[in-house]
Amino acid sequence: MTDFDTIELEHDPRGFVTLWLNRPDKNNAFNAQMIRELIIALERIRNDSSLRFLLLRARGRHFSAGADLTWMQESANLDYDTNLGDARELSELMYNLAKLRVPSLAVVQGAAYGGALGLISCCDMAIGAEDAQLCLSEVKIGLTPAVISPFVVQAIGERHARRYALTAERFDGSRAREIGLLAEAYPAAELEQQTQQWIANLLLNSPQAMRISKDLLREVGHGELTPALRRYCENAIARIRVSPEGQEGLRAFLQKRDPSWRGDNNNDGESR
């Protein structure tokens, strides 16, 4: 899949895909073309049942500097309806990433500004460099992080979102870990090695079970205990236990062997 100009889809033979932001000369800043290409790429990922998970990464020094300057200049001359169309495109991108059935992991280095925090927040997990610089920068230029705000609030909580959206303070990767935007932050020199460790860990897990767990946790939400949720959870475990992959996992555990989905990927030294 090479028919993109601003992004790149890289398939790994182990069964996952890396979606690269690929405008390093522009610090991977967003423009209308990148947003549209990301939407197309996510649709391809959604329709590929062979994929186990998604990595979201960026070429070059920076994850993304936010909105492209030329694109912002053009937007300043657009009418309300055209701007609304642009907002709906960005919204489609964020919602499609957030609703993706396969697990998603963002890897963050350098700068991540504005809409880049939306992409990070839409992923299930994110890791990054301790010295990464992140910012909800919109209010500094008279705008608001409107489209990305639901996802940012889900990722870091309402109180932290209020602070960083209203002050537009920059914060580093270590702080991003403290507030929950990143699961872990590492020294920049170790980020690639740690990314490979995350990949290896995800490859140990049942692809079906990870997808179903995402569906389950989306349904559970904040965990309000209702009769409907109780029934959903009961049915979820019953269905997966009798599924082919669930049966394989149970048999492998009882027979003290690796399940079939691990193949040659089990390099963690686990003793069974």
Image (cartoon, rainbow, N blue to C red):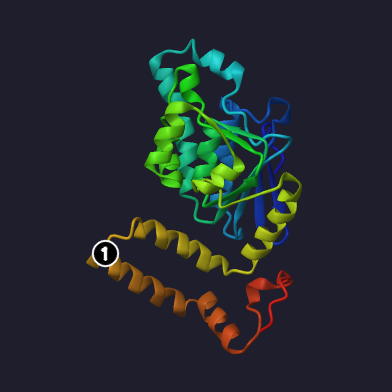
Residue 2 location (% of width, % of height): 72, 40
Residue 258: give x, y in percent of width and height: 66, 80
Quadrant of the rendered image containing residue 63: top right
Q: Disc 1 designates what residue? A: 225
> As drawn, is 193 to the left or to the right of 210?
right
Quadrant where the image shows the C terminus: bottom right
Q: Amino acid at mark 1?
A: Leu
Kindly indicate the quadrant of the structure image that contains residue 83.
top left
**At x 50% / y 51%, what residue is drawn?**
100
Reply above or below: 184 against 91: below
Task: Tell me where residue 219 appears, x and y as whole percent.
Answer: 36, 58
Q: Is residue 68 visible?
A: yes
Q: How many marks?
A: 1
Query: x%, y% of residue 222?
Result: 34, 56
Which quarter of the rendering shows the N terminus? top right
Q: Is residue 221 above or below residue 89?
A: below
Q: Residue at x 25, y 65 (%)?
A: 228
Element at label 1: loop
Give the image quarter of residue 19.
Answer: top right
